Image (tube, coloured by chain):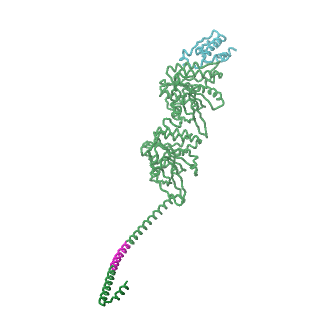
Chain colours: A green, B cyan
Amino acid sequence: MQSAGSPLGQAPTKASTGIAGFDEITNGGLPHGRTTLLVGGPGSGKTIFALQFLARGARECKEPGIFVAFEENSARIVANATSFGWRLDELLGKEKLFFLDAQPQFDLVQSGDFDLGGMLAALEAQAKAMRARRIVFDALDVVLALLPDQAAKRREIYRLHAWLLARELTGIITAKAGGDETSVVIQQQFSFMQFMVDCAVILNHSVALGVSHRNLRVLKYRGSGFDENESPFLIGSGGLEVAVARTPARVDAKVSNERVSSGVERLDTMLGGGYYRGASILITGFSGTAKTTLSGAFAAAACQRGERTLFVSFDSDCNEVIRNLASVGIGLDQYVKNGCLRMISARSISGSAESYLVRVKTLAEAHGARCLVIDPVSTWYKSSNDSTVQNVADRLIDWSKGDGITLLCTSLLDEMSNRVENGSPLQISALVDTWIHLNYLMQAGERNRGLSIVKSRGTAHSNQLRELILSDAGVTLADTYTAGGEVLMGTLRWEKERAERVASETAEAAAKLKRVKLDAEEAELEVRVKSLQTELTAKQVEKALLVRATQSHEGELSRGRSQMKELRGDDATIAGAEASLP
Amino acid sequence: MSRRALFKFQLYVAGDAPNSVQAVANLAAFCRDHLADRHEIEIIDVFREPKRALAEGILMTPTLVALTPPPVRKVVGTLSHAPTVLLALGLVAGAA
């Protein structure tokens, strides 16, 4: 069943669907010149998918399209699609789009077997006239239901498929499946079709915990790689938007060494210069720990640098946030006015985590945001199960990284417990680059805010707990004191600071006094040394005099004795006297 | 009275597809049996005149369109089941 359009050995070319995310999943779109089966329950978005595919082709790919409506009146389809801004009327007017109403009449009388040959002949003429390249058969199951037996149904499906292939039209056949018991037959019908077509996509719409979840899955795609997982999608203001984990072209894009200020000077110092550009930052804490304030400081700093910023608040009104932050010296008002900052209050939005993500993404892209604040991201956990949230958190971070957006999320811990350490409500914490935790410390009848950096990848960061002080002048951080294994904050810190100041002054005075005393002692000793020296010299002189005096005295004596002997002439006494001498 | 009325038929066929060939034969037999001398049949091949089929909204072949007497009626299929056709053309009461 090789299409004539793509010779053997050549990968099929793709027909872009214009559906954000879907073209990424399928590496470019639906197989060009081949047939795609789109199966889904009622309200799963099949018709919108198909219409968007046609609108894209007609508007951007120079591929006019035909829409064969078996179920719904074409006027109603066009009317319903006006909200998506595809301007179908305009395309209809230019003959780039054609609707064929093929709803079986309710009073249709049937006698015996029939086939779709007439329709195909009519379509062929139309396709030739308008050079159509794309065609959609919406709700084929409706017409198949009229056929008497399985063999006839198969025959018509084959007829249709062969016709599409021969004309090299890129076709979508949609069919209902799932939902109720009666669809089992249809499912059998279409499971056979799934073997026949080149590409099959399943749309799914379910409700979990009262929240609607939509996802789609590419079941098969001949001759092409594709993302095999279920991908959540949303019907947004511009049509379908499929959430994809990663935009393949942007993987590992833009790793920056640039630092961006957190808006709090001291915090920048703690982080070694600020957050990295394009990093994801998580601020956790109980309610009232100034998470929003820190987010606001970051947003204000970004706007001051002239970077477009999106601030999404999930728990309070924008004006409230602006007012509250103004009270701590963070003026966001001016930036909102000059258009640099876009504040969105998403309090009223209820939906799945996917829908939040897609909305935030759309808004950020529309605003051209370089910095994004989500306050708090924990709202998302409420409406989804753990695995979905994990998935969404992954995609949020991948997306912001890929786009080089610096992302700051806050996360509310709803219990006054230390759940943060075991991490169960915070799947996102493992993924973020910087994690700042805010906490209360209760001491001496006070509640003070503490800030610590749990982690900060690629950054030498302070391991110390700081006290976060909010005042009219802004946000500041103060050192905390550790005393006897306890951290001191607030008044206790102030007292400690004062005590230390007094103590150091006292110590300084004491040291001065001691120095003066020592100087005096030194001087005294020097004087004493001098006087002793003088005394010593005198003694030495005296001693020398004494020696000399003794010598002269002895000389006198011996001289006297020898004179005497000479005078006496006494030899014996001379000998005796000489012997007795020492 | 409908018994006297002229039946104008258009039969849309898809070339010589088996269903269509069968329908032509069935219609001829039906007219012979029930509407002798008061019917006109035009056979339209959708392959030759697709625009006409499109304009008329004929998508399934074969389709029989009974233009007169009013109202216009359509019967889809090979017309193999004569009672259904009779019923559709409002001939049941008269035939009974």
Residue farthest toward the bottom in the current orientation of the protein: A568
User: Outermost residue, top direction?
Assistant: B37
Is residue B12 something that shows in the picture?
A: no
Q: Is residue A132 visible?
A: yes
* Quarter assignment of residue A205: top right
Q: Which residues are magenta?
A: A523-543
Q: Name the residue rendered at 29%, 90% in the picture.
A: A567
Residue reaching furthest right?
B96
Say which quarter of the image contains residue A74: top right
Q: Nearer the viewer, residue A75 or A381?
A: A381
Locate residue A558 relative to residue A106 in the image: left or right.
left
Spot occupied by residue A461 in the image (x, y as percentages of width and height): 48, 50
Most foreground residue, A545 or B71: A545
Image coordinates for residue A473, horizontal then vertical, percent: 44, 53
The number of callouts visible is: 0
Q: Where's residue B26, x and y in %?
A: 64, 13
Instruction: Decide whether residue A79 is among the magenta residues.
Output: no
Q: Quadrant of residue B73?
A: top right
Quarter of the image containing the C terminus of chain A? bottom left
Where is residue A427 drawn, in percent x and y?
56, 44
The image quadrant where one finds the N terminus of chain A is top right
Say if A25 sits above or below A110 in the image: below
Residue sitting nearer the eye, A186 or A407? A407
Examine the residues drawn in magenta and state their main secondary structure: helix
Does the magenta-highlighted stretch encompass residue A530? Answer: yes
